Structures are given as structure tokens and as C-alpha cells.
Amino acid sequence: MRQPSFEWTRGPAIPVVSVLFALVLGGLFVWISGHDPITAYAALLRGAFGSPYDISETLLIAVPLLLTGLSVAVAFRAGLFNIGAQGQLLVGAVAAGWVGAQWPDLPAIVLLPLTLLAGILGGAVYGGIAGWLKAARGVNEVITTIMQNYTIVFVMHWLLQNGPMQAPNAFGTPASAPIGAGAVLPVIVPDFLVPSSRLHAGVLLALLATVAFWFLLWRTSLGYELRAVGLGMRAAAQAGIDPRKRMVIVMAIAGGFAGLAGMIQVSGLFHRVYDGFSAGFGFDAIAVALLGKNAPLGVVLSALLFAAFSRGGTLMQSDAGISSHLVEIVEALVLFVIAAETVVRAVARRWGTPVKAVS
Amino acid sequence: MDVLIGAGVLAATIRLATPVALAALGGVVTERSGVVNIALEGCMLVGAFFGVFAADRTGSLPAAIAAAVVAGILLAAVHALAAITFRADQIVSGMALNILALGLTSYLDYQLYSTTGTPSTIPLVPNVHLGFLENAPVLGGAIGDQSAIVWATLAIVVLLQLFLFRTVPGLRLRSVGEHPRAADTLGIDVRRTRYWAVLASGALAALGGVYLSLSVAGSFSDNMTNGRGFIGLAAMIFGRWTPVGALGAALVFGYGDALSVSLQGVKVAGVEFPVQLLSTIPYLLTVLAVAGFVGRSRMPAADGQPYESEGH
């Protein structure tokens, strides 16, 4: 049913309004707790974009957010809710970290693609399990992926603390042995531009993955089918698409994106896997995907926004003495307004058409 | 044998199972009425924080518990509003509330207690000393000195089991979760029933949070629930959406956790026992149960589906 008067709900209006609303409400909260919201947000902005180094650090956080965001978004497009991006990221990181450290002497031209493949495959298998359990046994993917998120955390505790990946001389945090030089994604920002920048080639891989996401969904027949399934199981089934067969593929693809994020964190940033690795990205990814309306450009922009929040929040705490957790409050409010979009739609439907015609 | 069934392990099992059981009971109530509430983790966390906060401000334990429960109910009320009245996506709403609870409690904790930590002088939930068990082997050590909340939890399990399966309001609540249309036709107010159920789930989860902060730890620390609300959901599923089952599942999970501590460093056939893998048991068992490989767990038929009454 076309509703021309509410077309604006489809454009960027809702995301922009929701972010503004969340920022205002968050500011109000800062004010009530006895601080100056302008100071807070100025510190946040400075922390995220104040210097070339800050910008490169913000981009560094945006990479895993973008990839896990794509992971959640591709599942959403097919009507599945992937809460498991965090777990898939970790499996990808473990797989990449293991391969990278197993053959440390291989040249980059062999080892880097191998590590990349391991990360993507690890995530894809983990995601695929959730898809298969749904297709074959009717298990809700929300339940499976939540459980998977926790399972891998404890498996990692074992692997790194007294299992096969335990590094012989890891001090403090349990960690794996470092990956070989050939598995490392190089830093791509020269020192004379941004001194001691850590921004690595993973950012290019993430952009490439975004293009792949777009191509897959809008330029291939598989993508067409996935979107058809997402728009309506029954309609798709009548068009001859078996939604159940697609579940495994979708969740594997979703897991692949998240696994790539894990691989990039290992190869680009930490060069090993450790306990408590990259916590939280897979959960923020849900907000990233929803705010980005599951569209390529949208996900890129919202990943940048949340990365800026994250980086800026840390500096806001050290510079202005306001807890970085303000960022989480704002993020939750953003999510809420997006959830409320269905409210806007429902209200529009109710008030825009004669009452009798609705049900 | 002591590392397997000693008094210490059993006492730890009960301690670890209690908060999970309370979250699971909340899950049973809300999902039996047809609303998925993954914000139980968040309800637990606000319960843990506001319990400590109110204990600090008022110095009164009853006030602290009341404040914690009210905080849990308020968070759940937002979920109820979103899920029942606005028919928003229940998972998104729940995720948003979990993030909100984490952000809010950590923010307040930093602003109020960052330099000192939460005060050590706050009133705590007392333990119940069972003098007559003092000399009983194993049992005395296992249950002779547990928090009052442990015993309250046991009572809640029994009462909730009776309520859901032996009373008319309980039957109504379940009918709303199984077949809301039919319940509506019989004159049951679907929305109101679901509201009460979601609010009750918030209160129960918050009590679990109080147990963590005002009974076990004696303080609040950021994200101290650390996923226990989600293990509660697992216990609810593994316990087949019944209070007694949820308690049983929580005890099984708690035992696994207790073993992962007591078996630390123990060598089996020369290899260090992988204690960390014991902690994956709740999650694996739950998925297997839902998939029908271990028993069969069936969720209420209308679980997670918003209800729109006819003629509106």
C-alpha cells in the first residue's frame, strides 16, 4: 500500500532525527547530573576528530563496526536477526590468529590470503550453524546466536589459558603467540602525514566488503532471492524460492562479514588473539545496521558515527571528567527511536486510512 | 570427591544458580504471556545498582530492595510499552534497554563512586543460619548459611509453579501466550495480562541483581551481571518454560560453574582439566534442547508475537 504522505519515513529523516533526539536527551541527562552538556559534546567531538591522529583512530574503530554492521544488515535483509556478530567475529579472530601463528615463516603473498580466508570461513561456519539449526530444526536464530556469543568466549578462555593456543610467554592477559610478519596488514598512513598512526589496510578491506555487500544484494540473483525472502516468506515461497535453503547461506554470509572483522582486528591491530578481545563490537553492530537502514552507505555512515562516539567518549572522560558511558546511553536512545519508527508507521497507518480498512 | 560433591561446591552451586534462577523465573512469566524480554539482563543490572544506591542513601535494607525492584519494573515497563502498546520489535527494544541499563548504571557509578568505589558500610541482605544443620555433613555447609534471597527464590519457584498451573489467573496468563485471539474472545484482556507479566519479570530479574550486589558482592561494579540475565533465558528454555524446570536448569548450570572453579588445576590423565569449557554447558544444552536433540523444549505458541485486537 502506498502512503505518499509518509514517504519521509523511508529517507534519512528518521535516522537523523533519532540521532539528534538521542543527543539532546543525552545532553539533558548530563545537565541533570551536574555537568555542562556543551563541554561534554565539545570534548567528544574533539576526541573523535580533533587531530589527524584522532581521525585515524576513529576510522580504526569504524572498521570492525562497519563489518559487523554489514553482518547484521545482510541477515536483516533476509528477514533474520543476527545477534551473533560478536561471536562470529571472535571465531574469525581465533581462526585467523591460529593460521597466522601456525606458519609464521610463510611469505605474505601466501600467508595473508590464508589468514583472510581462515577468518572469513571461521565466521561463516559459526554463522552457518545458526542458519542450519533454524532451517533444519526450527531453532530461532536469536536464541542460537545469543548462546553462540557466550560459548566462544569460554572456548577462548580455554584456548588461551591452558589450551592449544596458549602462548608460552604471555604475561598478564592470556594471549596467543603473535602472528607471522606475512599475516600482518600494513599501516597505510605514512608517518609524515599522521605521526604514529595505526590505521592499517583493513580499512580498504572493509570498504571492499561494503561494495561486495551492495553487489551481492542488488546485483545477483541470490541477493534478489534473499531480499524477497526478507520481504515475506510466503510470497517468496510462492515465487519458487525455498526460504529454508537460503537461511544457511545468509547466516554463513553474515558470519563471513563478522569473521572478516575479527581477522582484521588480529592482522591489522593486535597481531595476536587475547582474552577479552574486541568486546562489544558485535552488539553495537545491531545499532549500526538499524541506524544505517541496512543499506551500504547508511551502514558506513552509522559505523563512522558510532566509532566517533566511542573514540570521543574515551577522551570526553579523561578531558571533561564525564563518564564515557554517556555514549552507551545515547546509543540506546538511538536504538529506541529506531524501534519507534514502527510506531510512527503504525500511527500513520491508523490515522492515514479509514479505521475499518485496517484489520 | 570433595571437588565434585563437597559442601563447598554445593554451596557455590546454589550461590551461582540463584541469580540465574530469578532471571529465568522472570523469563517464564513474561514468555508464558507471549512477550519476549531479553532486557532481563538490564533489569538485573539496574536492580543491582539501585539496590546499592538506595542502601547508601537511606541506610535501610527494605528501602534498598524496594528501590531495586522498582528500578527493574520501570525498565520492564518501557519494554512493555514498546512491545505491547507500540508493537515494536521485541528484540530491538530489549537490546536497547540492555545497552541503556549498562550505560546508565556505569555512568552513575562513575559519577557517584568513581574515586572511592561503592561504600562498604551499606546494609546487606542477611544470611539465614540454620543452627540445627551445623553438624550435619555436607548439607550443613551447603545450605546451612545461605542468603535470605536464596530461600525467597525457592518460595517464589513454588508459588509461581502453583500460580501458573493451578490457578485461574495463571491459566489465563498462559492462554494469552498460547492463543491470544481465543483468550480475547473469552473476555481476557490480552494487553493488560501481558503488561503485568512483563512488569513481574522486571521485578524478579531485579531481585536477582540485588542478590548479586547486596548479598554476594556487597558492592556494585560495572556490568556485574555479566550475562547472567542471558543465562537466565537459557535456563528458562532448558527448563521448558516452567518455574520448577527453570530452577532445575539454573542448578545444573550453577553446578557446572562451581565445578569450573573447584576443578581448576586438577589434572586428568596428566592433562589439565579444561575447566573453562564447563562454562559452555548452559549454552550448548540450551541450543540442543531447543533443537530437540535433548528432550524437546517448545516455546509458548504466541511468544514474541504482538497482538492486535480485532475491531480497533
Image (cartoon, rainbow, N blue to C red):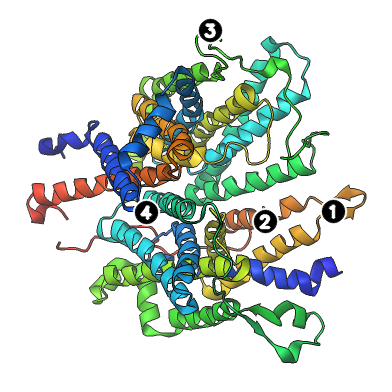
SS state under label 4: helix
Q: Compared to A118, does B100 lie above or below?
A: below
Q: Which residue is mark 1?
A: B265
In this rendering, do the residues under marks 4 and 2 share a single chain?
yes
Question: What amino acid type is highlighted by mark number 1?
Answer: Gly
In this rendering, do the residues under marks 1 and 3 share a single chain?
no
Question: What amino acid type is highlighted by mark number 4?
Answer: Gln
A106, A234: nearer the viewer: A106
**Marking on residue B90:** 4
Residue B216 at x, y percent in the picture? 62, 68
Please tell me which of labels 4 and 1 falls first in the chain. Answer: 4
Q: Chain of mark 2?
A: B
Farthest residue, direction right: B270
Q: Which residue is mark 2?
A: B281
Please tell me which of labels 1 and 2 falls first in the chain. Answer: 1
Task: Locate residue B79 relative to residue B241 in the image: left or right.
Answer: left
Q: Nearer the viewer, mark 3 or mark 4?
A: 3
